Structure formats: C-alpha cells, structure tokens
Image (cartoon, rainbow, N blue to C red):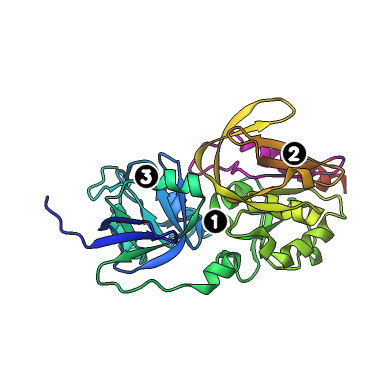
Amino acid sequence: MFRKEKAAMLVLEDGTVFEGYSVGADVSSEGEVVFSTGLVGYPQSLTDPSYCGQILAFTYPLIGNYGVPALKRNSHSIPLNFESDRIQVSGVVVAEASFEPSHHSTNLSFPEWLKQEGVPGIAGIDTRALTRLLREHGVMKGKILVEGAGLAHTNLEKADSPVKVVSVKEPIRYPAGPGAPKLVLVDCGVKVNILRILIDSGVDVTRVPWDYPFETLEYDGLFLSNGPGDPKACTRTIAHLRHALTQKRPIFGICLGTQLMALAAGADTYKLKYGHRGQNQPAIERTSGRCYITSQNHGYAVQEASLPPGWESWFTNGNDGTVEGIRAAGVPFKAVQFHPEGCPGPRDTEFLIHQFLDEVQNRRSAK
C-alpha cells in the first residue's frame, strides 16, 4: 500500500545529518541520542523512565512488527506490558517501522502509538552508520526535525532534573498481609516490573519520591530504583542514603541505585562513552566467574578504584570490564547495574531480588 510520509531529519551536535521520513507525531524534539542493541521489547524500552529525555535509536532493523498492546493495569493500578504509563523517550530512530503488525495482542501499530503519545519518530536512515558514529565519538545531543513542525524546543526540566520528572510526587503504599516485611522503594524512575515482583513476593511496599526523607519511616529493607540522568544530580537522595548506610538494614539497588549507593559510600561515578543499553549485555560474577546475559540501560558507571575499604566490585561487564555491581563486606548492602527483573528479558538474574527479599524477611523474623 502506498503511503506518503513527511520528510524528517536527525541532526547531531557534530553537524552530521541523517535524512529519513516521519513515522511518529508531527513535532520536532531534541535530546541525547543513544542506541539500544535489543532485538525485541520496544514497548517496554520506550516506556522505561531511565530513557526520559533521550532520543533512542534501535540497532535492530525492523521495529513494530508485533505492534503495541493495549494499556492494561493490575489491581494496584500498575501498568501491564509496559514499564510506565507513557512513552518516556523524546524521540525514536529506526531503520524501518512496521505499519501493519501481526500479533494477537496488537492494539495499535508502532507509528500509531508514537502519534498517540505525541512522540516523533524517524525511519529510513542507516542506523548501522549512526551506531558506529556514536560508538566512535560517544553519545551526543541531537534533534529530530519533522517537515512543517518547526524547531525543537528544549525541555529544561527533563534536561536538568529527569529524576524529578519521572519520580512519584507523593508516597504510595502497596500493603500486604499482617506481619509482612516492610520495604521502602526509593522511586528515581522505577520500572514497574520491579514493583510487580516486589508486591507479588508478599512484602509491604512503600514507594517514596526520589528526595523523600525515608529515614523517618519504619522499614526492614530499602530498595533503590533505576532512573535517568547523572547520579551526582541526586544530592538529596545521596544524603538520605548516607544515613541509611550507618544502619544494618538490607539495601539493594538497581542501575541508578548502584551509582547512588556508591556515591553515598564515598566512591565516584563517571559517564560512559556510549553506555550499555539492550537485553544482551554480559555481566560476570567475580566470585564464581559465571556470566549472565542481562538487560541494561545506563550511561554512567562506578569508578572501581574509588570504592572505599570494605566495598568491592561484585559483577563486571564482559565487554568492557566496567563495574556491573557492588557490595559491602559484613553488611547486607548490594547493588547491580543491570536489570534483574528484565522486562524485556532476560530474567536470568531475578534470583538476586529474591535473595535480597530473603534477607529482609530474616531481619523481620529476628525482631
């Protein structure tokens, strides 16, 4: 079927221009251009709050072939099939977009979804060349300019305080039965599959904003979520976490949570050249030497040499050797850069979350 799409361009800050056509909303946008090597899972990736404010390029050549499911929620009003209740990216870049998906769960086509959410998309460009450029020079800012849509405007809040944008504004409690362990989840942009796993495990979860003084709450365990942006911008979270590290209550972090834990402990973080994004990232557990294939989405990492005495690197990346997890000796403080909850998978390391919950339960039982 013949289809006439508007012209669009991806313009990078170094002056490189990729010409293609629009497959999303008739708006222009800007953001940091990053790439993901995942083969599937675009509904989960695009709704991942860790991508807030970024322009996401998919290296897999065809996106949208199984469409987009309807937004459904469970009994706690938590979205199913997505990682938040909206698309979080500022724009999408693909080689080819499917306009006619084929899957029993399809509610919208990929382009229809982008238009409904007001997000621009560009297709018809060489994403291989784009990825090689970003790998060589590092991620850079860029703009998607759609024919007739005018210039892109900077969203200062997303650029400067993305965690503030994606975090809940007030505490939310997900109660469990009498005697259940109490868990505080610091929401820096949590993927909701983390919430689903925690709630289904029978713990009483209190989800608090990124800067909430959680030390004022009674809890058996502390969970630090993933989220977007530079961890050093979360100064309030780090300050509260420093207090938590003086206690012996179990703490577990994912992605941004790892960087925040490291900073609170006195270590340093730095920006990766092009980050780790996709569902095929190898993480090696240092003690056993076992390699796990993991889902990842982060642009910052912990500087291993800066870890203070009593802390060690737990996992390392099989590709570049960077820190993929940290832990403290003698106290139940652990965190990983990858996503044990997967979604999109794999979920080979979900057992790490359940090990943490066992520690929380043991502390509760010991009271």
User: Left or right of 329: which side holds 57?
Assistant: left
Spatial CA span between label 3 and label 2: 34 Å
Which range is magenta?
329-356
Q: Quadrant of residue 264?
A: bottom right
Q: Which mark is residue 291?
A: none
Q: Of marks 3 and 2, which one's residue comes earlier in the chain? A: 3
Depicted 24 relative to depicted 123: above or below: below
Amino acid under disc 2: Ser
Coordinates of residue 336 in the picture (x, y in percent)? 67, 43
**In the current view of this chain or complex, which residue is farthest to the front?**
15
Is the residue marked by circle 3 packed among few (<14), some (14-19), or many (20+) residues within 10 Å? Answer: few
Depicted 230 relative to depicted 291: above or below: below
Please name whichever residue, 256 or 82, is drawn nearer the observer in this view of the structure. Answer: 256
Number of residue marks: 3
Q: Residue at x 59, y 52 (%)?
A: 195
User: Left or right of 345: which side holds 103?
Assistant: left
Q: Which residue is mark 3?
A: 129
Is the residue marked by circle 1 packed among few (<14), some (14-19), or many (20+) residues within 10 Å? Answer: many
**In the current view of this chain or complex, which residue is farthest to the left?**
2
User: Left or right of 318: which side holds 57?
Assistant: left
Coordinates of residue 273 in the picture (x, y in percent)? 56, 48
Q: Kindly report which numbered mark, 1 or 3, lies closer to the viewer in this rendering.
A: 3
Q: Which residue is mark 1?
A: 50
| Magenta region includes residue 226 | no
Please name whichever residue, 158 or 13, is drawn nearer the observer in this view of the structure. Answer: 13
Helix, strand or loop under label 3: helix
Spatial CA span between label 1 and label 3: 25 Å
Depicted 361 relative to depicted 113: above or below: above
Let me know if residue 222 appears in the view.
no
Dominant SS of magenta comes to loop
Helix, strand or loop under label 1: helix
Q: Which residue is mark 2?
A: 313
